[in-house]
Amino acid sequence: MTRLLPPQIVNLVSGGMRGPLLAALLTLVCAMPLVFLMPPLDRDESRFAQATSQMLETGDYININYQETPRHKKPVGIHWLQALSVKLTSSVAARDIAPYRFPSLLGAALAAFACAWGASRAFGTRIGTKAGLLFGVTFMLATEAFFAKTDAMMCGLIVLMMAALSQIYLRTRDLPAGAPKPKVLKLKFIMWLSLAAAILVKGPVPAMVFGTAILALWAMDRRIGWAKHLGWLSGLIMVALICGPWAIAITVTTDGAFWTSSIGGDLKDKLDSGSEGHFGLPGYHLFLLSATMFPASWLFGGAIQTAIQRWKEPAVRFAIAWFVPSFLIFELMPTKLPHYPLPVFAALAWLCAVSLDVPLKRWARIVNGACGILGGVIFTAIVFYAHSEWGGGPTFLLALLTATGALVLAPFAGWLLWRGHQRYGFGFLLAAGVITHLGLFSLASALTPLWMSRQLETALRTAQLDPRQGKAPGPVATLGFAEPSFVFAMGTRTKLCNEDAPCAVQALIDGRPVFVESRQEQAFQAAAQAAGVTPLKVSQVSGHNYNGDDEVLTLYRNAPETP
């Protein structure tokens, strides 16, 4: 077999904790440029960031609010981490999105680290390092790494929890009667601490992944004696001590409204119907898996063969129990978004990495190629469509770069793997993942019509009407445009008039700048005429709201009175 690096170098890099650290580093390399490059995203990211900024402004670290509206959806954990990040690296007044993204970046790095750590203990350091590296460049993990939301940090904590659980399982599953008590105290501490922290970040999802994996192992092993070594009493006490104080505080502060809204509203809606328009049929996640786990999709056939042939091996069995039941639950939920199954992707990365040492049958090689090419086609179609709709000259080169990674470099890696050149093939596969990811989002950041809030900021600065520069009184008002990214950029006091035309006219009377969306223009002019106000058109901004339709917004200020 042709070798990309001498075995001595490979062993030096992957030995001990160096493999997990290398996986974490690669994740940072893949995602960090986009932390600074991508503008704030609508809607969830900017809502999370704005809610955190209000915590810092008010000093209230219990309640979660978006402007005047309580945000009773997720626990407080990610907001505390974001607030700490902003305090250490920036300030609220800077309105810089990067510090709010740093916890997600670290969460993704933790996920790759824990994936490699757990797989190293299960399959050996060489396979473990490959699993961590592969997971680190997986498209969905590298994407969530620069979103200021809960999912990357939740993923990191869940993967760390499951890596610790796997080691307890592997050490205790086949212990004979009367054997000395296994030394797993550190692993139990890591596992329960990770579970508690993950619950404080995301709520019930970590407990679901934890519980379904244990039940699946029970079903496959037909015994559950090993679970007595998990330290249930002390572990549940730890979870209660970590999560309990905030749970009590938010219950008292909101008189129970947080739980009514988050469980009886947000969670119930996700389980009952397609919450917030995100309905998807069963098979949604399975179809997208070739893209969400790209470039690991080039190893799916091998992962399936490994699971079928070696399912009786405890480590392989654990990976199956981790992935399958939770993935099925995500498929059966009516509400679907591509990142939902992210916490179980690490288990599939384990199987993909193991398959690199398995002589593959022809059908597995064909599945490898089909899934890998499907993922590449999806990304290529996305970038060239985006370029044709909203791009210009430079974006074509970024689209071409993305397509090169997805449909040239990745298939070349697949061909090398098919021919048995594992080291070369794996190296090119990682490179394809990094290039595809960076190319796609570099292109996205350059599509000016998609970033409406950024265009509105530019219009204010150009007209010297930006209240942040002391050029005009604030806050800015909007009529018919209410994206959270604009609120985050301009500040908590930004006035969203929605469809209330007199509200926008009052802003003009106060001397404040107003943006009016074209569909509200007629109502705005009528309200202005009724109030005896003459709006003065300053400039116009047009683009595409990627959460809706094409939009045209006009910037107005109050016309000076005639002497």
Image (spheres, helix red, strand yellow):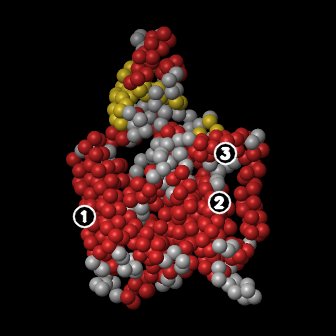
Instruction: Please name the amino acid that badge 1 sits on.
Output: Val
Quadrant in the picture for the N terminus: bottom left
Badge 3: few (under 14), some or many (20 or more) residues near its Cα, within 10 Å?
Answer: some
Instruction: Pick the residue in front: 90 or 201.
Output: 201
Q: How crowded is mark 2: few (under 14 residues within 10 Å), some or many (20 or more)?
A: some
Q: What amino acid is at disc 3? A: Ile
First-in-chain label (3 vs 1): 3
Point out the tag, 2 or 1, that comes first from the N-terminus. Answer: 2
Is label 3 in contact with label 1 (beta carbons under 8 Å)?
no
Per the image, label 1 sits on a secondary structure element best described as: helix
Q: How crowded is mark 1: few (under 14 residues within 10 Å), some or many (20 or more)?
A: some
The residue under label 2 is 207
Q: Nearer the viewer, residue 559 or 181?
A: 181
Q: Residue at x 36, y 36 (%)?
A: 544
Determine which residue is flagged by label 1: 408
CA distance for labels 2 and 3: 15 Å
Residue pictured at 32% horizontal, 62% vertical:
370
- Residue 325: percent from the left, percent from the top? 56, 61
Residue at the spot 74% in from the left edge and 64% down from the top edge: 236
Residue pointed to by mark 3:
263
Q: Is residue 154 above or below residue 57?
A: below
Disc on the earlier residue, 2 or 3: 2
Three-letter code, disc 2 = Ala
Q: Quadrant of the C terminus?
A: top left
Q: Give SS at disc 3.
A: helix
Question: Is residue 181 placed above or below 239 in the rendered structure?
Answer: below
Query: Is 278 situated left or right of 255 in this image?
Result: left
